[in-house]
Structures are given as structure tokens and as C-alpha cells.
Amino acid sequence: MNVHYGLIGTSELLKEKDPDGSYTFSGITQKTFKSAKDSSGLESALMELSSRIHHNLTLTENIIDFLPKINISHYRISSSIFSLVSDFSDEIDIAITDIPDHQEITAKIRAIGFMARQNNVTLSVYPDSTNSLIGEDVEHSIKELNFHSWFFETAGFPSNASNPIIIKPFSEPKSDTHEGAVECVKSFYDNFQKLNKETKNRIVLQNESSGFWNPVNLFKYFHVYLNEKYDEGMVLSYSNHADTLNSGSFDGSNAVEPAVNIGAFHETWMGVVPIFLWSEKDPSNPTISLDYLTEPIPDFNYNIKWECDVRKRDKAIVKYTMPEEEDKVTEEVIMTITKNKYKKSSDAARSFNALYDKN
């Protein structure tokens, strides 16, 4: 089978069995952290942040444990698992080693990596949408990308695109010309070289839904040009919806067929199973994804893992990964994985966070 389905973010199936918050990721804002620090001290605020990180890591581990039971082999983790630690804000700068129990957090990350490999589940992450390596002010972007790579490294994954950090250019050339594109790509490459070696090996670029960076231009400049100029072409991730909205062409008129773009992008992964994005939007509001896919993802004769951008998430995906068992999933399989996994925190002061501790 060439088509593999991947989950993005939360599990709707798990949330349905326990809708009171234990299967929802928890963050903390700068304002809340500052308030906690002012009222109870820095250590107390850091412990609150630590509690949320532990909750998010436990939830991540639980989802990865669940996915093989519904034949899903890929998971895009939340980019905000670590909340303020991965924000690299000028106002609040918190390193993972500042967390009082950071060693326990590191151990949990290793456990997540072990479970993912044991279950043959690959992971990916999409950094913040403001993350760009093009331009001069990229210090925060570099720190964030290195942090995500540190997570994968700590989890024990190889430093290659099998567990990618997927980004977009998020910057337009000054002119829609070869010279403008080259200037843009050179800026990217100069900043790319400032990343840690392991981070560079994990970076993957995706085509955009508007602007210059359609599939053709992305392939032409970020893969072919960089290969010819620096012998270091980028790995590319294909988005079907972005291609629909922003198709490229070779002759300026006829759009390149999706199958051609998919084939070209597939080859940039050099033997690693690609992680691509499949999305369908609501015709009445193209900014909103459909609850369910209208049909199975087509087989393009390439082995591909497709992250599924659907509002019902795994509840929509099981229609294709377990079509005969779909009704049973919400009863038997989920009960097996959720039974006695969580209990409400006995600390009333934390109950509003919907944080849970293992039995």
C-alpha cells in the first residue's frame, strides 16, 4: 500500500471518550506566567509551566501509543508542547534547564521516541508560522528550529528527513524574476548554514498557497539551484491544497499536473518515505478544512505518508484505515488505551488547567 495516513495534533477519538480536558494540550501565556511569578515567585511559576509540559508530553505519548491500533503510521506533534520554553521571547527567556524537573522531562522525551520507534510511527513538526530563514532578523527562527531538532535528537531519532521539521519560505522575492528568486534563496541558504548540523539535516520546505513559491519555483530554486550552486538541494514537502490554489507552470500558461509535482518532490527525499500534506477545504469558506475527506487520498504510485488536514482528525482518518472496524474503534479500541490512563489532579488549585497524572 502506497498511501499512508498521518494525524495532525489532537486525537478526536480519544477526546470523545474523555472530553473534560485530559486529551487537550495545555499552554501558558506570557501574561499568565508573569502573573504567577509576581504572586507566588519564579519557582512556583516554573513548576506550573513544568506541569503543563508534563501533561503535553504524556498526551503526546498516549496518542503515539494509540495510533497503531487504528493503522495510522505518522503523527505531526504539537509545536507548542513546551509552551514558553520554545517561544524564545525577548520578554520571557526560559531554557529547558531552567525547569526544576528538567531531567524528568528529558526522560519522558526519550520514552516518547522509544514508543514511536517501537510502534513504527514517524513524527514531524511545523514550527510557528512566523518562522522564516529569509532575511536579516532570523535569530528567533534559528533558536526555534534548533529546539525542535533537540527534541528529535533527545528522542533518539536519526538526523535526517525521516522525522522532519517542515517550514515554508514565508518571504517573497523582491521581483518575480530569476535574479529576485536567487537573492531570496541565497538569503535562506546563508541563514540555513547557521543552524546546527542535525537541524539542517531535518529541515524540509513546503510549497505555499499564494505568491512566488508554487511547486515549480520551489523545486527549481530550493532544490535544483541549491544543488547546482552548493551541492545541497533542499528536501521538499508537497501540499495538495496549496498546489490547487497556486499551481506553477514551465511555459507560463499550462499548470503542471499534481502527479508531476508529487513525483519531483518525492525524489528529493532520497529514499526516505516523504511526509506530504493532504487537505480539503469548505467550498463556502476556503480557510476552513472539511470535517471529513470526501474520498480516499489517491495513490500516485509513490510510497507517501500524508498528514491529513481534516477537522475530525483521526475520527475522519479511520474511515479509510479501518473501514470495517470504524464503529468499533470508538468503543473497544479506545477503551483499551484510555482505561485508567488518567485521573484528575487532586490539587484543586491546578484543576482549571485540566492537568492529569498517571495512576
Image (cartoon, rainbow, N blue to C red):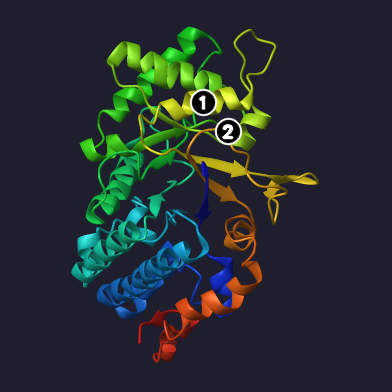
Of residue 331 and residue 151, the one placed in the foreground of this image is: 331
Query: Could you say where residue 291 lies in the image, as x and y percent from the top left?
Result: 69, 57
* Residue 281 seen in this snapshot: yes
Mark 1 vs mark 2: in front? 2
Amino acid carrying label 2: it is Phe
Residue 4 vs residue 315, the one in the foreground? 4
> Which amino acid does the dot numbered 1 rest on?
Gly
Q: Quadrant of the C terminus?
A: bottom left
SS for dot 1: helix
Asked if the residues shown at circle 1 and circle 2 are in contact, with their CB atoms under 8 angstroms apart, the answer is: yes
- Image position of 82 (left or right of 258): left
> Which quadrant of the structure image shows residue 259?
top right
Residue 87 falls left or right of residue 353: left
Farthest right residue in view: 284
Residue 126 drawn at (x, y percent): 44, 46
In percent of width and height, residue 229 lies at 32, 11
Q: Which residue is mark 1?
A: 263
Q: Give the label on residue 300, or none.
A: 2
